[in-house]
Image (cartoon, helix red, strand yellow):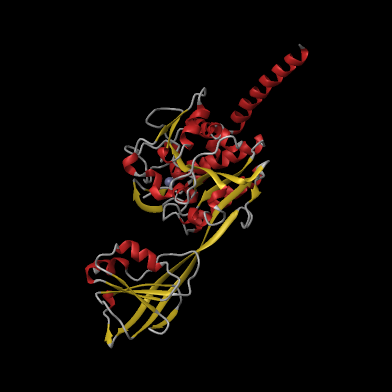
Amino acid sequence: MRKLIAAGLLTSMTLFSFAQKINKIINAKEVERIETVLSSDDMKGRKTFSPDIERASAFIEKEFKKTGLKEFPGATGYRQEFNMIESSNTAAIVMIDGQKLDDSLIAVSSFQPKVSLTEKNTETVNIKASDDFRKKYSEYSSSKKNLLVLVDASFRSYASRLKRRSPAKFEQPDNSVVFVFGINSASVFSIELTNNIIKRPLNNVVGMIPGKSLKNEYVIFSGHYDHLGIGKAVNNDSIYNGANDDAAGTTAVITLAKYFKALNNNERTLVFVAFTAEEVGGFGSQNFSKQFDPEQVKAMFNIEMIGTESKWGKGSAYITGFEKTDMGKILQQNLVGSSFQFYADPYTTQNLFYRSDNATLARLGVPAHSISTSKMDNELNYHKVSDEIRTLDMNNMAEIIKAIAISSKTIISGKDTPTRVDTKALN
Ligand SMILES: [Zn+2]
C-alpha cells in the first residue's frame, strides 16, 4: 500500500510541478518583457542590413546566454554570421562577330570587379523561344562556368527588368554569366565587364539544447527577428515596429528555449533560431539550411505572428501547409485534453506555407510548418507602422506559446516522427 500511495503522490506532484513550471516560465509578464524590447522604437523596425537590427541580435544573444543554450557548430557565440554578396555592373562592352551590342540588350551576373571574356574562356548557350525563360535564367545565372547566353528576341522585355544587378549570393563566384537578347549565334566575341562588389554582413541568432539520446536528430523552433525598418510617416509615426511580425515569433523562440532548458528532458536536439532577412528574401533561413544535413531535421516549428487572436478566438492557432505532412495531426493529438486547438491554415489561397522561413527547409523535405494566429484576410496592422505592442494580447500569446510547447512533446521525446514533405509535389 505504502509504495502505491507514494507512487501516486509522486505522479500528482510531478504533474503539479510541470504545470507550475510551464506557467512560471511562459507567462504574459515574461512575454511582455521580451516583446517590449524587440518592438521598441529604439530598434527602429529591425531592418535587415541596418545598424538597428544589430541591437535586436545583441538582445536575443543575451537571452540565449542567460538561458544557458549551447552554441551551434560553426557559429561565433550565438551568431551564425555570413555575408550577402551583391554586385552591380557599372560597364559592359560586348562585341559579337564584329558588332557592338547596345546596352539595353545586355544583362549580367558577375561578381569580380574586372572581367574579360572571349570565346576562348567562355561557353555559349541559347535560350530558345520555346524555353521557360525564368527556369533557364535561374539555371544559367547559378552556373559555375563562364557563359554567354544568347536569348531569343521574344524575351526582350526581360532585359530591362533584369537590369545590371546580379542576384545576391552567399559566396563570391569566380565565373561570370552574360545574357544578350536578340542574338542567336556568336563565333567570335569579346566582353569587358566592370562590376561594383559589396559584401554585406548578416547573422542569425542560434542556440541549442543537445538531445539526451538522439543527438543527431534536430527539432527546430524558429521566428524571424528582422522587419521593415523605417518608412513613410503615418500620423507622425514612421517606425514599422513589427511587434506581431515577427517580434512575436522571436519572443516565442526565446521563451520556449527557457522552458525546454528548465525541463531538461529532450531526447532529440532542440535548435532555437531567430532568422535575419526574412522580409527581404529569406536569406537567413537559406544560409541556416546549408549548415547541416536536412535529413537530420525531424521537425521545424516556425512561429509567425501569434500576437493577435485567431479567427477561432483565444487559445487557437493554425498550421500552414497542414496536408503536406502528418506533423499537424501529431500536434493536434498532443493537444487533446488541453484547452488549446490547432487548425489547418484556413487561408490556403494566400500560399502562406511558401511565404515564410519554413519553406526553405520544406523544399529540402523537412516537415517544416509555420504556426500563426494572424487573420490574413483581415489583419489590420499587418505590414503597417501600427504593428505595435499595444495591439497584441500578451495573455493569449503566452497561451499559444504554451500550446506550441505541449504540442511538440512527442516529437522532442522521439516518440513521434512526422512524415517528410514530398519535394516533387511542391510549387
Ligand atoms: Zn513575418
Q: Say how many tags the image has.
A: 0
Q: Position of residue 57 (x, y in %)?
A: 55, 52
Q: Which quarter of the rendered picture does the N terminus lie within?
A: top right
Establish if 360 lies above or below 125: above
**In the image shown, does 311 or 175 lie closer to the viewer?**
175
- Image point 32% across, 62% down: which residue? 134
- Image point 43% across, 49% down: which residue? 423
- Image point 45% across, 78% down: which residue? 113
Residue 320 appears in the figure = no
Residue 92 appears in the figure = yes
Left or right: where does residue 19 sit relative to residue 346?
A: right
Q: Position of residue 335 (x, y in %)?
A: 51, 28
Q: Position of residue 162 (x, y in %)?
A: 32, 67
Left or right: where does residue 183 sit relative to residue 373?
A: left
Q: Residue furthest top?
A: 1
Left or right: where does residue 372 sit relative to residue 180?
A: right
Establish if 48 lies above or below 219: below
Establish if 414 lies above or below 365: above
**In the image shown, does 183 or 403 lie closer to the viewer?**
183
Q: Position of residue 412 (x, y in %)?
A: 59, 38
Q: Residue furthest right?
A: 2
Quarter occupied by residue 23: top right
Establish if 411 lies above or below 119: above
- Image point 40% across, 42% down: which residue? 387
Q: Residue furthest left?
A: 154
